[in-house]
Image (cartoon, rainbow, N blue to C red):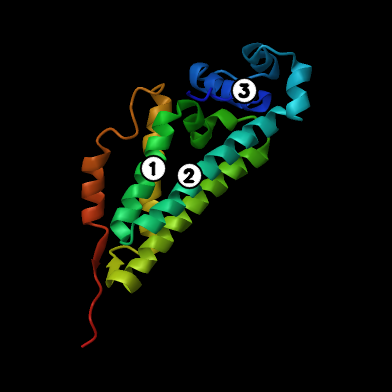
Amino acid sequence: MSQATPTPSRRDQILQALAMMLEEDSGKRITVSALAKQVGVTEAALYRHFPSKARMFESLIEFIEETLFARIGRILEEEHEALPRCAALLALLLGFAEKNPGLSRLLDGGVLTGETARLRVRIHQLFERLETQLKQILREAELREGRRTTLPASAAANLLLATAEGRISQYVRSDFKRRPTEHWKEQWILLSNQLLRESPQPA
């Protein structure tokens, strides 16, 4: 006998509706009134679960962080070389954005214009964490593999993440028509071929 799919909590329903509105109402400012209508409850009912719209956005950002970094932890356990680790991390980020168009608008940051500053700070911090992780992977390559980045590790990590961020921004600007993963395999081959070189051996 198959188990019934559990009904999402009202809190989860609100967050799912918000993510859907971010995807479907591209370019429109989301109001609590419109969100309440989408969920099928009163504004007062929304506020019983979230004290403000900012807290709803923050909960979505927390979901993004938890999902990405839990999977990155598994990547680091499964992959032991720098290039496969970087490839998997960037593919994860691009794939997540592509499968979650509404959340990609949060990653892009444009939808947070006019919202409380702490939300933009949270998105900035998320990308800072990703860049730090890439930088650590690249620095470890010299110790683990005897290979170093052709650019300083911090510059190389910044280049990789900026490329991924650009793909996500294109996705949002195109109203989700230009997929972040389109041409990515070929682009990654070009980037990765220039990323590392053998460390010089002492004479």
C-alpha span from label 2 to label 3: 21 Å
Please name the residue shown 56% across and 38% down the image.
63
- Badge number at residue 68: 2
Question: Given this view, does label 3 or label 1 mark the residue nearer the observer?
Answer: 3
The reply to whether discs 1 and 2 touch (Cβ–Cβ < 8 Å) is yes
Count residues near mark 2 (Cα–Cα under 10 Å), then give few for <14, some for 14-19, many for 20+. some
Give how far across and how far down residue 187 sits, in percent.
24, 43
C-alpha span from label 3 to label 1: 25 Å
Q: Which residue is mark 3?
A: 13
Give how far across and how far down residue 21 sits, in percent.
55, 19
Amino acid type, mark 2: Leu
Nearest the eye: 140 or 80: 80
Q: Which residue is mark 1?
A: 92
Amino acid type, mark 3: Gln
Give how far across and how far down residue 52 sits, in percent.
74, 29
Count residues near mark 3 (Cα–Cα under 10 Å), then give few for <14, some for 14-19, many for 20+. some
Disc 2 is placed on an element classified as helix
C-alpha span from label 1 to label 2: 7 Å
Nearest the eye: 73 or 120: 73
| Residue 41 shows in this picture | yes
Disc 1 is placed on an element classified as helix
- Badge number at residue 135: none
